[in-house]
């Protein structure tokens, strides 16, 4: 039994770490078995368990769309071994690193490093964080003419960047900051953030809320009001990242 305060703290830390790893393993198994059906829940849980990952095997495997069994076949291993490797319960030797990296199409260090690969996203203009306002737009074939910004964990095929003009969302994205918009995610989800447009071609950046459907400001400026859409509102895409200087 621990006798000193330091030993007690170390035991508490060990217990908390093991509990977090057990929870991660349980959630990962549910995701792999397809027991979590809601895409939003899947995304949130994947983000949650990534915080407790000891390596990046699962991340690269998911990018490939492979099950643990499919990866196991490619490295002449077993599903149990892949599960234990991902959960940190089997030593990730250099032999395993090289074999897994060859199968997953990455460098061995990427499986154990927290370095995230970045991609270039075009900055195509600006968007109002206020009332609906005419914003700069650009055709897809003109994107290459624009400045780009480096960003991790986004798909460059479906994302672009916009500068923020206005302070109606300054609790989330201060004026002058940059938002990354994913045009493949157009379904309105309660409390998520979107760039939306109206029939007149005007756009704004707001938080969507249900019951009733509305566009909420997130601002220190009390003059900004909730927008209750009249007529059709076009969702340009979900805002998945905010980038700004401190």
Image (tube, rainbow, N blue to C red):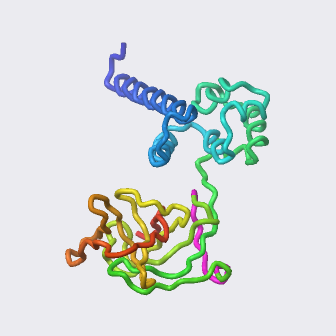
Q: Residue at x 40, y 57 (%)?
A: 189
Q: Residue at x 61, y 52 (%)?
A: 115
Measured as percent of width and height from the top left, residue 198 is found at 41, 78
Q: Residue at x 23, y 74 (%)?
A: 225
- 11 up-or-down from 192: above or below: above
Measured as percent of width and height from the top left, residue 147 is found at 60, 80
Inspect this view and state whether residue 51 appears.
no
Measured as percent of width and height from the top left, residue 33 is found at 56, 31
Magenta residues span 143-153
State the residue lying farthest toward the top. 1
The question of residue 126 being in magenta is answered with: no
The question of residue 152 being in magenta is answered with: yes
- 169 up-or-down from 104: above or below: below
Classify the position of the C terminus by image quarter.
Answer: bottom left
Q: Nearer the viewer, residue 65 or 75?
A: 65
Measured as percent of width and height from the top left, residue 180 is found at 51, 68
Image-quadrant location for residue 55:
top right
Inspect this view and state whether residue 146 appears.
yes
Q: Nearer the viewer, residue 230 or 13?
A: 230
């Amino acid at each position: 039994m621990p006798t000193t305060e330091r030993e007690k703290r170390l035991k508490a830390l060990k217990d908390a770490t093991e509990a977090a790893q057990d929870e991660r393993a349980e959630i990962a198994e549910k995701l792999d078995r397809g027991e979590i059906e809601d895409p939003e829940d899947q995304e949130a849980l994947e983000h949650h368990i990534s915080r407790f990952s000891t390596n990046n095997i699962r991340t690269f495997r998911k990018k490939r769309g492979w099950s643990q069994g499919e990866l196991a076949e490619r490295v002449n291993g077993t599903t149990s071994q892949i599960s234990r490797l991902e959960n940190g319960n089997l030593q990730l030797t250099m032999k395993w690193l090289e074999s897994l990296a060859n199968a997953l199409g990455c460098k061995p260090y990427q499986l154990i490093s927290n370095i995230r690969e970045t991609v270039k996203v075009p900055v195509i203009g600006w968007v109002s964080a206020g009332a609906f306002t005419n914003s700069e737009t650009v055709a897809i074939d003109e994107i290459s003419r624009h400045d780009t910004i480096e960003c991790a964990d986004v798909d460059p095929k479906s994302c672009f960047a916009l500068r923020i003009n206005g302070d109606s969302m300054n609790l989330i994205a201060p004026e002058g900051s940059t938002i990354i918009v994913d045009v493949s995610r157009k379904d309105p989800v309660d409390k998520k953030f979107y760039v939306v447009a109206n029939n007149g071609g005007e756009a704004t950046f707001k938080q969507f809320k249900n019951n009733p459907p509305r566009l909420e400001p997130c601002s220190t400026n009390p003059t900004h009001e909730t927008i209750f859409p009249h007529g059709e509102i076009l969702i340009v895409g979900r805002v998945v990242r905010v980038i700004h200087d401190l």
